[in-house]
Amino acid sequence: MAAGIYEENDVSYALTLQSSLAKQVLGTRGLRIPELSNALRIKSIMSSLKFRSTSVASDEALCLGAMLNLDVAVIQKASDTLEERMATLWRMLPEVPSYLLLFGGRRLQDEPLRWAPATLLGTRNPGWAGILKHTDERAAVADENGLHVQFPGFIIPAHSGVIFRKFYFPIARTRSWYEVCCYRTLSSDEALKHEAEGHGSLIDGTIAVHPVGGSGSNVSLVLVSQVAVFRPEVPIEVRSAGILAILTTRNDREVKARFLCDVTVQFKAAEDGTASFEEWIGDMRATETVIQDETQIWELLEAQTYEDQAWCIA
């Protein structure tokens, strides 16, 4: 019966029960089912390993490779370090779950794999606690250019300089302001320590923002969001997971950007001319949390919104 279910091309099953079976019933034992796609295998592995650890860190990539039916010898020969072995593993996978971009753990440091997890063991982003969980089951393509995904998002015109760990930007056509919080990823132990001491995991200081591969003062930020928070039917209290990146190139089909950090984005205020709004924006400007540089406040520039854009994150 199980084999018959997996052989059928049932769209409803693929969008609903298949994912739940892989995660809740099959667990890592279900990885032996040959019909499972790599995307579903990775999802099952992530659910099983989120709060686990290993005595030899570099062995993680070997274990993952075995569970994904990859050539473990290739991973082993790549290096003795976890980072190099994980980079080799991700290069061997042409397809991964799209939500891997929003997994909230530690990432590799070199392009085009800055989107990729450096480990699936014992990492989490406490800044994402309580956010709406991701339900998009589409697969993403990984290649030598980066991770190709489709998500809602923003492109925010900016200037070279720095951005604050928490900043706000407007969408002029809707007269709405949005709050962005930039997070650094902690190990599981670090996260528990910060939560116990009442600290968040916002990045320390500021993030440098400069054009990639060029010069000048103009730069655009890409904010890829799990949820299209700018849509009128989305409740204003929804806080979405996302990532921040620097735009590098774009064409009619896709926007390419360099990964910077994990973020959350949420509607903050509507520019309605009331005293409460004027007080809020006055306080915000006084504490320098509006994106700005030495000469121009970015509130004068309009962010573009995209409901289902093709992105390539390197």
Image: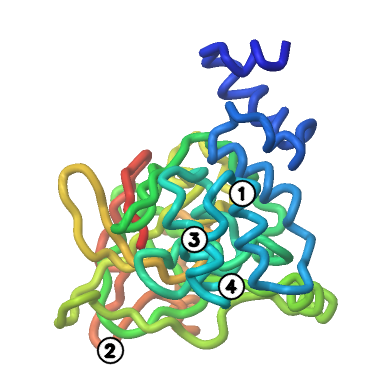
Where residue 59 appears, x then y in whole percent?
A: 67, 67
On the image, numbered disc 2 is attached to which residue? Answer: 294
With 293 as the anchor, is 56 left or right in this view?
right
Tag on residue 82? Answer: 4
Query: How would you rate the neighbour count of disc 1 (Cα within 10 Å): few for under 14, some for 14-19, many for 20 or more?
Result: few
Dot 3 amino acid type: Val
Q: Quadrant of residue 111?
A: bottom left
Quarter of the image with the C terminus is: bottom left
On the image, numbered disc 3 is attached to which residue? Answer: 74
Q: Residue at x 53, y 47 (%)?
A: 99
Where residue 80 appears, x then y in whole percent?
A: 57, 77
With 136 as the anchor, is 52 left or right in this view?
right
For numbered disc 2, what is the local secondary structure? Answer: loop
For numbered disc 3, what is the local secondary structure? Answer: helix
Query: How would you rate the neighbour count of disc 3 (Cα within 10 Å): few for under 14, some for 14-19, many for 20 or more?
Result: some
Which one is closest to the eye, mark 3 or mark 1?
Answer: 3
Dot 1 amino acid type: Glu
Query: How would you rate the neighbour count of disc 4 (Cα within 10 Å): few for under 14, some for 14-19, many for 20 or more?
Result: many
Dot 4 amino acid type: Leu
Q: Residue at x 76, y 38 (%)?
A: 29
Q: In front here: 284 or 258? A: 258
